[in-house]
Amino acid sequence: MEFADRLGALAAKVKNQAEAIGTEEATKNAFVMPFISTILGYDVFDPLEVVPEYTADVGTKKGEKVDYAIVRGGEVQILIECKPSLGQLKIEHASQLFRYFSVTNARLAALTNGVVWQFYTDLDAPNRMDAKPFLVLDLLDLDETLIPEIQKLSKDSFDLDSIISAAEELKYVGALKREIAGQFREPSDEWIKFFATRVYEGSYTQRVREQFTLLVAKAAKQFLTERVNDRLKTALGAGSMVSAEAPVQSEPVVVDDLDRDTEIETTLEELEGYQIVKAIACGEVKPQRITQRDAKSYFAVLLDDNNRKPIARLHFNSKQKYLGLLDENKVESRHAIDAVDDIYQHAEGIREAVRRYM
């Protein structure tokens, strides 16, 4: 299995089990040890490679332990401190890492709750761990651009010089991406003023600030939606082109509430759901045969861009989300889902819908 596939498989496990893991010890067994062994490739049962409860006396602090130390060539290279998976990681949790970093040869340290991995080095001052991570890996929201950097930490590809040389750029690019994402989710006063004063010619009063708080948030959401749509159109050949191997339809297209409407707004959640349904359906047909159409009442995923061949319907316009699956008589059954990822639980029903049209 390729490195990215192994990482994806662990991410899927984390998504399914994270809420059931309540203690630090359970987090280590379920998520941290598999990451060290399956992803990084170190033998967690070989004390020459992975030392659990690693101890190094620091000044007046005696007998304190770091959860794991990864050793290469007899020298500690990576220190790992663990916290329960349900808890949020805070810099205060890294106090032992700070102390141990200065008295070992380690140039890398990781703070993790099994879900999020924060990697640190000593960019700001030699032999002193930085206060901010240079790389943050979230297994619930995998950033594919980070996969090659994580691979450099693995046993087979370990490249400390390359990791350190790339760390500064990774640190600031990652921080900027997280800041931009935060501004898109909840614009700050500075962000709102920055854009408002560039498009509004009057005085920036309290009333204008309140007005543009809504406008900036709405514009940001529409901008992201349009960018995602553009990417999908490019990937699917303008989104509505039927594959050359798809059969030509002789029957008339049924005109129903799938007709486009100027009030329809395709959301990022709908597009994410479409990508999941498409990924599942691609086990049966070529990806270019899976298309989508949005409507006021639901978002439809179709085979061959044909209304008579619905694969699934996404009802995401209310607080409770539903996945709609249709039987051979086109009778729809709705399945309540709490998150878009829950669509994977209905993979067989989606595949069956595709096979029915084959």
Image: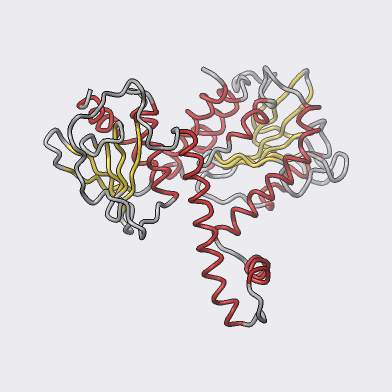
Tell me if 180 is positioned left or right of 85 in this view.
right
Residue 204 placement (x, y as % from top left): 66, 79
**What coloring was used for the rendering?**
secondary structure
Instruction: Choose top left, top right, bottom left or bottom right for residue 348.
Output: top left
Q: Does the rendering let one see residue 182? A: yes
Residue toward you, 151 or 101 = 151
Residue toward you, 231 or 347 = 231
Residue toward you, 82 or 340 = 340
Residue 254 placement (x, y as % from top left): 19, 42
Residue 21 placement (x, y as % from top left): 45, 41
Q: What residue appears at the point 35 percent right and 32 percent down from the top-left corner?
A: 290
Quadrant location of the C terminus?
top left
Looking at this rendering, what residue extends furthest in the left direction? Answer: 329
132 to 25, vertically: above or below? below
Q: What residue appears at the point 46 percent right and 39 percent down from the top-left corner?
A: 233
Q: How many marks?
A: 0
Looking at this rendering, what residue extends furthest in the right direction? Answer: 126
Q: What residue appears at the point 50 percent right and 30 percent down from the top-left corner?
A: 8
206 to 7, vertically: above or below? below
Residue 336 placement (x, y as % from top left): 27, 48
Instruction: Choose top left, top right, bottom left or bottom right for residue 156.
Output: top right
350 to 323, vertically: above or below? above
Q: Does the rendering let one see residue 64? A: no
